[in-house]
Image (tube, rainbow, N blue to C red):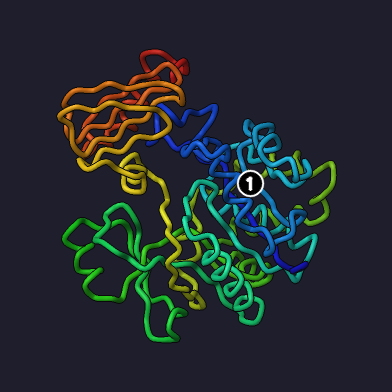
Amino acid sequence: MKNNYCIIMAGGVGSRFWPFSTNERPKQFLDFFGTGRSLLRMTYERLDGIVPASNVFIVTNRIYKETILEQLPELEENQVLLEPMRRNTAPCIAYAVYRIRKQNPKANIVVLPSDHLITNEKEFQRVITEGLRFVANNDALLTLGMKPTRPETGYGYIQFGNGGEDLRKVKTFTEKPNLEMAKVFLASGEFAWNSGMFLWRADVIIEQFNKHLSEVADKFEEGDDVYGTGKEQDFINRIYPQCPNISIDYGIMEKADNVYVMLADFGWSDLGTWSSLHEITPKDSDGNAVAKCEAMLYNAKNKMVALPEGELAVIEGLDGYLVARDNGVLLICKKDEEAKIRQYVKDAEEKFGNKYI
């Protein structure tokens, strides 16, 4: 277990969950289910028995450092890696990988988003353990693919080829499809949902950075003498703006020829939208879901209601609506038009500045 490491990506804003998620406190730091644990805390605790606490690194924006240390008091300050700006997942992962390699060149690494929900944690731990064993013994990049249960248009897809029962060679990565194409993917049995979770050895992923994203690799290679020292942050602040804004999927995973997918089913949701929260939240006989607060709903169906804990919502009608209130903002919109929320956030920022964002 000493060679097992984890990178948790925790720098996102989560604007689609506004007004609960704000710039100051994005969704990974929120307790959506009233359990006393944030999504970040739940992600960290799932690693128990797989990755030692000293081998967990959080990559985040510098404004969230204190929040992370507050929610994860087990970590040392030098385990929180601070991005001076957002540059997508490739530079984020590269920073942590080069830092880990300096500490342990034999590291086996799992990369996890900080804001996903997993309901079957025992199965998740089995899959991660098996995946770490695979990458320790193979020069491969491994991603986790969720077995699809419906024609979902909100996820990217992974097409896989022949292989073992749950371990397959990746053929292609596909962006979020329209509904018709998603139905084709589901019917074919050759596609899995792209979870955004990855496993690899440090030396293997660095080789791929050198091959496919040399403009990123060259920058982080320069810092080999400063990682883990007092000069590290100044170095990162200097080179990070020079990195391209590019995802690990587009920059490496879609180009490398040694990519495998492990098919899994452990009750996964990326919690990307209010609709995804509605889907996993217990509902009444009319399909209404209530998060954190109490609610009395009349003549209403298929509604999502979320207010701060201890508050009561009394609502008549509004079938298929989202009603959410927090941080001084009341949002009421059709659930199937929630894609507009990002525009609402932009409009509110233009009119009121950062007061409600």
Would you say 263 lies left or right of 9 here? left
Residue 339 makes an appearance in the image:
no
Residue located farthest toward the bottom when viewing the structure as drawn: 163
Tell me which amino acid carries mark 1. Answer: Val
Q: Is residue 255 above or below residue 324?
A: below
Indicate the secondary structure of the residue bearing disc 1.
strand
Q: Nearer the viewer, residue 136 or 39?
A: 39
Q: In x, y percent, where is residue 222?
A: 74, 54
Q: Is residue 210 above or below residue 66?
A: below
Q: Nearer the viewer, residue 95 or 295?
A: 295
Would you say 223 lies left or right of 354 here? right
Q: In x, y percent, where is residue 131?
A: 57, 73
Q: How many marks?
A: 1
Q: In x, y percent, where is residue 146?
A: 40, 65
Q: In x, y percent, where is residue 263?
A: 43, 72
Q: Is residue 324 above or below residue 289?
A: above
- Looking at the rendering, which quadrant does residue 135 occupy? bottom right
What residue sits 16% from the left and 26% below the top? 317
Residue 283 makes an appearance in the image:
yes
What residue sits 44% from the left and 25% below the top? 308
For the C terminus, the quadrant is top left
Would you say 181 lies left or right of 199 here? left
Q: Nearer the viewer, residue 191 or 97?
A: 191
For the N terminus, the quadrant is bottom right
Give the labeled residue for mark 1: 59
What residue sits 61% from the left and 44% below the top? 41
Q: Residues within 10 Å of mark 1 (few under 14, many from 20)?
A: many
Would you say 12 lies left or right of 204 here? left
What residue sits 15% from the left and 29% below the top? 299
